[in-house]
Image (cartoon, grey):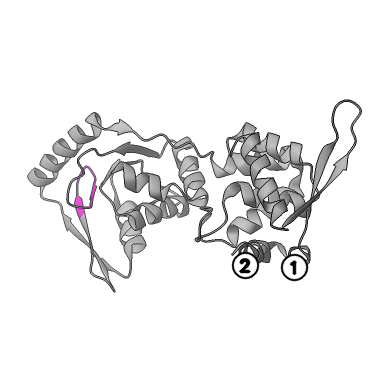
Amino acid sequence: MVERNVADVLRAALADASGEVLAVHPSAEAIEELVNVMTELDDVPAVRLLAPEGVLKDVMGDFILASTAADRIDDGVLSLRVAEEPPTNSLLITEDELVAVVDAGDRVAGLVTDDEAFVGSANGRYDELWAGAKGFSLRTPPISRVRTTLSEDLGSGIESDFTGVLASLETARGDDDGLDEVTISLLVAAKNEALLYDISKWGEDVGIASKATFSRTKTKLEDMGLLDTEKVPIDVGRPRLRLMLGDERLQGADTDQLASVAQTILT
């Protein structure tokens, strides 16, 4: 099969798959596209993904992708393991076929064989590799849980803004490729004038980051002028801090512009 890109090859291979699929040593791009394609398909086969630890860590450093992958893991259709000595070929293996994924630049091919003896031999070899591989621990919470708990704990308005900001981003890594999930959470909370205590407690409970990380990030954003805070007295204990957007460019930004404006200020 010759397609325009890796996603098209994966989509065709998964749609035609009979039974479980073993993805062996996919590239970083292929892992990203695999997760996305598994989310698109209505009837997706179970996929076992075997890849080098460094590649998995790098790809799953993006909150958007990692939280989507976590959903597929929760659904029971995706498993991740680490290949200590990764094979040289990028393969998709089913009960009946083996597909070698070859990127030729402007086109991507899935070279397919259904030779019974060869496919059986490949299944035996890579099943053995899978059995001996250690699991990859994905600490990012599933995006469906993130959205549900955010709506329940802080309101549908914040959840809608959070989802809108993520939709406007290609990645959420916290480096030059985008804002991280803690910064996004704080900006959305400030847009809705929520309390730091509430957003940081939610973030820690759902597994985004610790309260201390939220606090440190809040201080950094406040020092850079993106956030303001005001004290809100409570009946018992120290006053809590209400988050507000500090820069007028952020205050005037729509949800789908919030991340790009924040990124501009940060850089």
Amino acid found under the numbered disc labelled 2: Thr
| Disc 2 target residue | 264
Q: Secondary structure at mark 2?
A: helix
Residue closest to the far front: 223
Q: Position of residue 84 (x, y in %)?
A: 23, 37
Depth check: 125 or 119 in front?
125
Amino acid found under the numbered disc labelled 1: Arg
Distance Cα–Cα, label 1 vs label 2: 10 Å
Badge 1 or badge 2: first in the primary sequence: 1
What are the residue bounds of the magenta stretch?
90-99
- How many residues crowd mark 1 within 10 Å: few (<14), some (14–19), many (20+)? some
Q: Quadrant of residue 94?
A: top left
Residue closest to the far bottom: 106
Res. 144 in view = yes
**Which residue is found at the position 88% from the left and 25% from the top?**
236
| Disc 1 target residue | 249
- How many residues crowd mark 2 within 10 Å: few (<14), some (14–19), many (20+)? few
**Residue 120 placement, left or right of 30:** left
**Which residue is found at the position 74% from the left and 68% from the top?**
249
Q: Position of residue 47 (x, y in %)?
A: 34, 42
Res. 160 in view = no
Tell me if label 1 and label 2 are in contact, CB under 8 Å. yes
